Structures are given as structure tokens and as C-alpha cells.
Image (cartoon, helix red, strand yellow):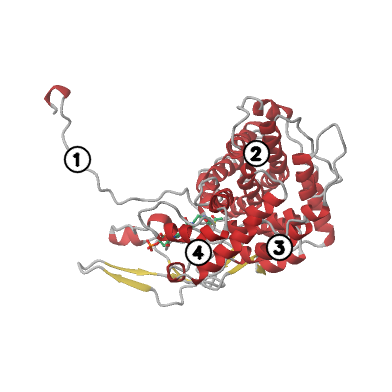
Amino acid sequence: MSDNGSRTPATLEMGDNRRAELPILSGSIGPDVIDIRKLYGGTGCFTYDPGFTSTAACRSKITYIDGDEGVLLHRGYRIEDLAEKSDFLEVAYLILFGDLPTAAQKAEFVHGVTYHTMVNEQIINLMRGFRRDAHPMAVMIAMVGALSAFYHEDLDINDPHNRLIATYRLVAKIPTIASLAYKYSVGQPFIYPQNHLNYAENFLHMMFAVPCEPYRVDPVLAKALDKIFILHADHEQNASTSTVRLVGSTGASPYAAISAGIASLWGPAHGGANEAVVQMLAEIGSVERIPDFIRRAKDKDDPFRLMGFGHRVYKNYDPRAGVLKSSADQVLDLLGQKDNPKLAIAKELEKIALEDEYFRDRKLFPNVDFYSGIILEAMKIPTSMFTAIFALARTVGWAAQWNEMIEDPEQKIGRPRQLYVGPPERAFVPIEQRG
Ligand code: ACO
């Protein structure tokens, strides 16, 4: 970052002789930022930015998004290249440690993850306390949070080795926890991890195997799922990642911070959208009914929105949606579902929306959730597990961002300010004198 003070600072003149000179910082790529850390001390003013639409809350080297161009880079590598040429644990290594691994580094990382996949049996006992119809995301929030009760004694978050162990545990155990939540919801016996399987294969095995017969993992499905994991691994300072950083900034356990991230991801405006997309496509039901739903999406008096469309940062095609669109064709073809009606509706919906002035003017394009649900559904993954799979993959990004935050000497406890609009100070009125 070239913030060595050589740039001319921004000047804020307030018309009442209050004036602030604010340094401008430049990243390696992307917009400059105005450093307002001294604004309050110098002027007595805060900035107002609900939804943080113009606020950079940290420096980060992990992920870069150019929303106008539709570009997503992890540690400098394009997501399209990573999805095509790499695999999930390799991308996880890249996101966590900064560079693609050598063969030896990869083998060590894969071994480390593989040998941390089991959960304490008490976690399974805890899970048995839930109602069978509990949503897997609710179970995951609780179970990942509960890990903090199991690994508190050997967790000094200021010790890099302790953080590394916590990172391994999180990345390794999250597929086990997600699949346990699913098995519990359908009343089937829990299936333990198998060390001879890779990350995606192991997850599919824990989801779909039963003890009474052998289960063969379909390599095509495992590959497609691995790609979905890659595409969801990190996405810079979105709502759930910011939640993880905010909780982590207090010095809380990473398990508690990531549990909070899972809660944040669950909302339909964020990770919950993949589930909502499939429900929406089912509700639309046929290509002929699309115009009616487009009309509803444009009607301000109708709460209906086109799920899987629009993004706070992308004002162009989400590159992850591009990868998934072609992946959907391949996977459905291989699964003998070439004429999948939901895919046909999705493609036509996308075509009509992209030609429509309303969507064009607002730069609303398909996001990652638009096609992922269709692929997951074709793979017989139940709808309630879609967001859980997103959380599973994003755990890598959350862990990387949490580590980066702890290591950053500039980070402070997250503590936004406010514009107070309530009553000014007033005298207390005894109850008999009120009304
Ligand atoms: N359907 C119809 N209209 C939309 C949609 C949509 N999906 N998304 C945005 N708009 C409209 C808004 O009504 C608004 O119109 P206006 O300017 O006339 O008032 C305009 O586009 C701008 O939208 P905002 O809500 O201000 O944009 P914001 O950045 O706050 O919201 C969000 C982004 C939450 C993703 C939104 O596009 C949305 O709700 N999309 C559907 C849910 C979804 O797919 N979420 C997944 C996002 S990706 C992810 O989290 C992994």
C-alpha cells in the first residue's frame, strides 16, 4: 500500500472554519480510500454510511472484487482459473496462506485437514437435543459455536500456532457438522468421515451413505461440488465476513465468531438466496409465467424480488454465476437431466431480465446463487442444505479473514458510531404524574 504521505490529502471544509486534511491511501488495485480516522478528533464529526456502502473497514490481501468489470481475484488469481484448474483444498491453502502450495505443502495441508475431520462425540450428543425438523443452518450455528466450549483451553488467539490449529479444525470439521445436521433431520444414522476420500467426496459420503450398504461416490458429482466449494470460498468484506471480523475483533473465540458468521449468512438477502432461488423457480413453474414475475419484481408495492439477481458490489455479471451457468449445463447433462425445467426457466428468466430496462438501468445481473441451487438440487442435495453448503465453503474465507484481522496491528475492536435522533435529555417523571 503506497500510503507514505506523498499524496495530496483530501481537504474537508465545513463552512464554519472547521477544516480537516484527510490522507488518501492507495491499494495495489481498486479505488483509493480517504483515511478518516482523525476526522472526529479534528472536526467533532462522524461520517454517516448505513450499510457501509462507502466504507473500507480494513486492509486486506485476500480477495479483490471489481464490481463494474465483474472480476473476482483470490490472492491475485482469477476465480475462473481457480474453478477450472484447481481444487478446493488448494484454493483453501491459497486463501489461508497467500500463495498456491507446492506439492509438498499441499500434501501436508490435505493431511492436516483430513486428520481433523472427526468431532468430539459430545457434539453428537448435543445435536441429539434438537427437534428433528430443525433447519441445518440453525444446528450449524449452535454446533460451531459449541466448538468454543471444546477447544478453549489451548486457544490463545495471539499465538499463531494456536490459530493455525483452530483453522485446521474449522475447515476439517465443518463438513462433518453440516452432514451430521442433515442426517439428524432425516433420522438416519450418523456417518463418520473416511480418510481415503477427498474433501468433496467425504462430504457426499457423510451425506448420502447408510450403514447397510456400500455407497460409491460419483466422481462427477464430487467434482461439481468441489467447484461449488471453490466459488463460495471467500468474497471479501460481505455481511457474514464483516460479522466474523466484528465478533473476532473483541478477542472472542474463532468458533464463536464463525458461528456468528453462519448466522449472518443465513439471511435471504445473503447466502439464504440460493434456497430462495429454487423456491422461486418452482413457484414460477413454467416459462410462460416469467413475464408476470418480472412485472412483480419491478412493482415497488410488491415485496417480491428476483432472487439470485442483484449484488451490492457487482454491477456486472457475477463471474461466479458465469462459471456456474456452464457448470449447470455440464452437470445436468451428465446426470441425464438435460431438460431440467428449472434450468430452462432460469435461463429464460435471465434472458428476459437482462433485456428489461428496469434491470439494465439498475445493473441487476445474476449472482452466484442464481445457478448454484439448480446444480445442488440436481445432485439430490436437499434445499435446506444449500445455505449450509455455502457456509461450509465460506468457512475457509472466514478463517482467513479472522487470522488476517488478528495479525493486523491497525485493527481495533469494531465499534461504529451513530447519528442519534432520539429525545434529548429530559427529567424523569414519576408514574402518577404521567399520561
Ligand atoms: N429484484 C428486483 N429489484 C431489485 C433486486 C431484485 N433482486 N435487487 C435490487 N433491486 C432494485 C431495488 O429495488 C432498487 O431499486 P430502486 O433504485 O428503484 O429503489 C435497486 O435495484 C437497488 O437495489 P438495492 O436494494 O438498493 O441494492 P443493495 O445493494 O442494497 O442490495 C441485494 C443488494 C440485497 C443483493 C439485492 O440485490 C437483493 O435483495 N437481491 C436478491 C437476493 C439475492 O439474490 N441475494 C444474494 C446476493 S449474493 C450473496 O449474498 C452471496
Disc 2 marks which residue? Answer: 155
Marks 2 and 4, how far apart at CA: 35 Å
Marks 4 and 3, how far apart at CA: 26 Å
Q: Position of residue 147 (x, y in %)?
A: 65, 35
Disc 1 marks which residue? Answer: 425
Marks 4 and 1, how far apart at CA: 40 Å
Question: Which marked residue is nearer to the observer: mark 3 or mark 1?
Answer: 3
Which of the two discs, 4 and 1, labels the residue nearer the N terminus?
Answer: 4
In the image, farthest residue toward the front:
288
Instruction: Say what secondary structure mark 1 lies in.
Output: loop
Question: Which marked residue is nearer to the observer: mark 1 or mark 2?
Answer: 1
Q: Position of residue 60 (x, y in %)?
A: 57, 61
In the image, farthest residue toward the top:
432
Q: Say what amino acid the circle numbered 4 marks.
A: Val
Marks 3 and 2, how far apart at CA: 45 Å
Question: Which marked residue is nearer to the observer: mark 3 or mark 2?
Answer: 3
Question: Which marked residue is nearer to the observer: mark 4 or mark 1?
Answer: 4
Q: Say what amino acid the circle numbered 3 marks.
A: Asp
- At 61% from the left and 40% from the top, the residue drawn is 255
Which of the two discs, 2 and 4, labels the residue nearer the N terminus?
Answer: 2
Instruction: Say what secondary structure mark 4 lies in.
Output: loop
Q: Position of residue 222 (x, y in %)?
A: 78, 52
Dots 3, 2 in contact, CB < 8 A:
no
Q: Is residue 20 left or right of residue 70?
A: left
- Of residue 412 and residue 415, the one placed in the foreground of this image is 415
